[in-house]
Image: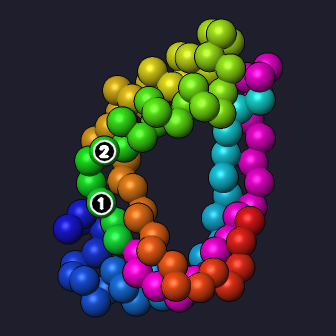
Amino acid sequence: MPAYFQNDDERDAFLAEPRLAMLLTNRASGTPIGVPVWVAFDGIAQIKEGGGAELVARMGPRYWDLSEPKLQETLDQWIQAEVAMVRIVIEPDRIRAGA
């Protein structure tokens, strides 16, 4: 288990509450843009270490125009920073809110 939580119960209690977050990305010009996102669901959520770089490598070309040097550079930096990433795997029974 990642060091963010002391045990499964602490993790589950955190994930049981709706959370508001800010999703940040870069425009094609390289300037940042942020949008609020929130989610509430019934089901299972797990925090997983590893696999973040592979996910970034797979999803980046799908959603970004990597002919833009700044976007390619950002993608490369994220892939190199895999130790700073975790994946949240959600298996919802019912989604009650969204972005």
Q: Name the residue under label 2.
A: 51
Q: Position of residue 73 (x, y in %)?
A: 53, 16
Horizontal relation, residue 91 to residue 9: left or right: right
Q: Is mark 2 on a helix, strand or loop?
A: loop
Q: How is the image coloured?
A: rainbow
Q: What residue type is labelled 1?
A: Lys
Between 31 and 98, the residue placed more toward the observer is: 98
Q: Residues within 10 Å of mark 1 (few under 14, many from 20)?
A: some
Q: Reply above or below: 46 against 66.
A: below
For the point 70% across and 32% down, the residue is: 26
Residue 94 found in image quarter: bottom right
Q: Where is residue 74 in the image (x, y as percent from the top left)?
A: 54, 24
On residue 48, the disc is: 1
Q: What residue type is labelled 2?
A: Gly
Residue 99 found in image quarter: bottom right
Marks 1,2: beta carbons within 8 A: yes
Distance between the alpha carbons at the discs numbered 1 and 2 = 8 Å
Q: Magenta span: helix, strand or loop, mainly? A: strand
For the point 77% across and 29% down, the residue is: 27
| Magenta highlight range | 28-45
Give the quadrant of the N terminus: bottom left
For the point 24% across and 63% down, the residue is: 2
Give the residue at the far front of this rendering.
93
**Residue 14 visible (yes or no):** no
Q: Does the magenta stretch include residue 73?
A: no
Q: How crowded is mark 2: few (under 14 residues within 10 Å), some or many (20 or more)?
A: some
